[in-house]
Amino acid sequence: MRQAPIVTDDSAVFWDAAGEHRLVAQRCGGCGALRHPPRPMCPHCHSLSWEAVTLSGRGTLYSYAVLHHPQHPAFEYPVLAALVDLDEGVRLVSNVVEVEPPDIAIGMRLEVAFIPTADGRAVPVFRPAP
Amino acid sequence: MTAAIVGVGATEFSRQAGRTELQLACEAIRDALTDAGVKAADVDGIVSYTVDPVEETELVRSVGFQEVVFSSRVPYGGGGSMGTLLHAAAAIDSGAADVVVVYRAVRARSGSSRFGAPKTSPSPTSGHSGTTAMQWCMPYGVLTPASWMALNATRYMHAYGVASEDFGRAVVQLRAYAEANPAAWGYKRPMSLADHQASRWIAEPCIRLLDCCQETDGSVALIITSRERAGDLAEVPVMIGAATTAGLFEQEIASDHYRPDLSVMEGSVALGKRLFDRSGFRRDEIDAAMIYDAFSPILLMQLEALGFCGPGEAKDFVADGNLALDGSLPTNTNGGLIGEGYIHGLNLVLEAVRQLRGTAVNQVREARQVLVTASRTGAILTRD
């Protein structure tokens, strides 16, 4: 099983939601800008107020890498590492699942799914959108 | 700037040093002091990287520095390596210190900080590369610098139609340099493009085993002082003509995934503008370049970002032989981090100094200006 994510006070908003199978980003209470990774202050307007908004979970594969080495016992290889540009405009590091490595392609449409980790948490991953 | 490198020292580069990072640093610094003709008691400044495991107090106690009035560490992992030159030069320019030691010591092969090993928690010495990459990459099995950078390199290949062979041709040149360099891991180890293409995937489609730098044990140290003092010390003082850094909004270190266009190393674009367009130095007057090649894709990407060729043109720039001794930009003439070893970038400064002194194994004729860069930090070293 995957090791649990490292959760800090600043990042808990993302991981707590992921544990409930919700994909969220922070939305600034001052200017409305979405941001990821989480942070305490809006870099555009310096507002400290924000809310966690649930995203559509749909996006596009921006880049990827098929990881062969080194291998860690918590993962199945090859690992399909991915950068996903979500439709709302934020980017995530994640995995693509339910795809064979030769079929992975930049620009493919994706939708979120959740995979359990140790400590009862979960991480968002992406599979091809129907 | 008014600072100069007057001494360099290094241990052997190996896969099993058999001694601590502290001892490796001590040996490199001792040799650098001897090279400079400077006593330990004359040193009053210390600069390293945030990720270096050698603690200043232990170093002072071992080498015998008497009164340290300036110390600093540069963030950004190996990307900060050339920032040590800016910190040292700024300390000297400002009068904060008279003689600064720059050092980096690693046991990146035999020690606990093996860079290529899967990393699932921040290490005590991970500095600013600690929780950022760990939080957002580790839960997905993206556990090494190669895997972090591969995400950018794949996008680069996609944007410009770059193939693994294009990276391989750069590696062949680096290994040809290393083949002649007795200090290099690649000494007398010839390597062909076919060897490169036959090497196993680390991160497909961009990083094969032979695209990776060596995990190395060793240390490099530099002694930096004022131009005035340098004139009395060194036979060939190496001037720090320009030194700068450029860390951009939303930029991470190796896990640099949040800038909009990852096919361009935008930190290096900003660095190139500062080093050249704002300093009066000219790209076409650079006699040799030492460019941080932790993995071969970032060598090509930096050639473009620094402005030595246009976007997407690095594969042709490399294939046309421009990195060779008779090319327009002899690059990483020690073999680079891929061919010589990985002292986290600082061995590239060592090679730049050798080129300017005229003592390199693969010597560029009459080298007067040498560029040293590591992604977002860099300097132009000169001799009069």
Image (spheres, coloured by chain):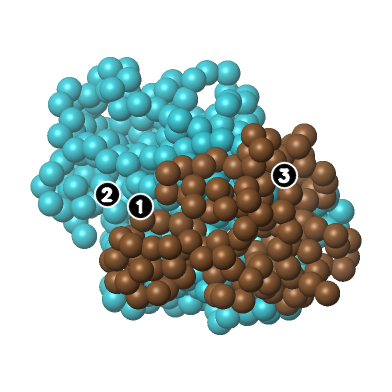
Q: Is residue A37 left or right of residue B274?
A: right
Answer yes or no: are tags 3 and 1 on the same subunit. no
Q: Tell which chain the image draws in brown.
A: A
Using residue A97 as the reference point, say whether residue B231 is left or right of it: left
Give neighbour class at mark 2: few <14, some 14-19, many 20+ (Cα, 10 Å): many
The residue that label 1 is drawn on is: B83
Q: What SS does tag 3 mark? A: strand
Q: Quadrant of residue B279?
A: bottom left
Residue at 69% across, 41% down = A117
Asked whether the viewer can see residue B170, the reply is: no
The residue tagged with tag 1: helix, strand or loop? Answer: helix
Toward the left, the furthest residue is B95
> Image point 29% across, 65% down: which residue?
A47
**Identity, as a three-letter code, of the amino acid under mark 3:** Pro
Judge the density around disc 3: few (<14), some (14-19), many (≥20) Cα neighbours within 10 Å: some
Q: Which residue lies under the disc numbered 2? A: B87
Q: Amino acid at mark 2?
A: His
User: In this figure, which residue is indicated by the disc labeled 3?
Assistant: A116
Distance between the alpha carbons at the discs numbered 2 and 3 = 46 Å
- Badge 2 element: helix
The span from disc 3 to disc 1 (Cα, nearest Å) is: 42 Å
Q: Amino acid at mark 1?
A: Gly
Near-viewer residue (A76 or A46):
A46
Q: Chain of mark 3?
A: A
Q: Residue furthest front?
A: A20
User: For chain B, what colour was chosen?
Assistant: cyan
Label 1: chain letter: B
Please say if the residues under marks 1 and 2 sit with CB atoms less than 8 Å apart: yes
